[in-house]
Image (spheres, rainbow, N blue to C red):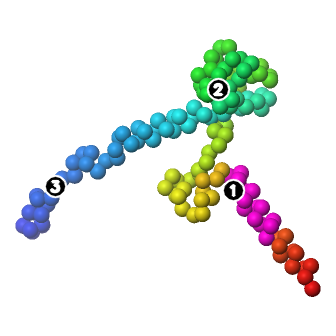
Amino acid sequence: MNDEQKAALDQAEPNKLGKDSINADTKSDQISDRSDDLRLNRFECRGCGYIYDPKEGLRKYKIPKGTPFKEIDRQKYRCPVCRASVDAYKDIGAKFKPAEGFEENIQYGFGFNTLPPGQKNVLIFGGLALAAACFLSLYSLH
């Protein structure tokens, strides 16, 4: 190394820890948003297929709307259909997940990225069926 390179290295400010790091407040907000999403997850009984939805609650057991499945009393709760315990339930996710993929990609396109997968399927295959019907109607022309 020559003297100019050594001088340039000495003058360069070292990368301080935390200077270019991710903002911890932003990450904690994102994590808390995800935990709120997990509170809305539905749970399905593996024995009979009954689905507990926190948005609906359960009047039979006097569980108010908005009560997450994890906060239900494990000792007292039984499936209203087959009487299975809490351990027989599995997490099937939220009922409505509006966006799939990366958050930054949702804004692109014609706005279809914000639709749930079921509506996207109806839109795509409905459009294909309509196009096929239009092309088949051309046979009626003489």
Q: Which residue is mark 3?
A: 13
Q: Are marks 3 and 1 in contact (CB under 8 Å)?
A: no
Mark 2 secondary-structure assignment: loop
Q: Is residue 121 magenta?
A: yes
Residue that lies at the very extreme toward the bottom in this rendered image: 142
Q: Which residue is mark 2?
A: 65
Mark 3 secondary-structure assignment: loop
6 or 48, nearer to the observer? 48
Q: Tag 2: residue type? A: Lys
Q: Quadrant of the image for the C terminus?
A: bottom right
Mark 1 secondary-structure assignment: helix
Taking the spot 18% from the left edge, 53% from the top edge, the residue there is 14
Which range of residues does the magenta coloring cover? 117-131
Please tell me how many numbered marks the rendered image carries: 3
Q: Tag 3: residue type? A: Glu
Q: Which residue is mark 1?
A: 120
**Relative height, residue 75 to residue 20 (above, below):** above
Whether residue 69 can be seen here: no
Residue 54 x %, y %: 65, 29
Q: Quadrant of the image for the N terminus?
A: bottom left
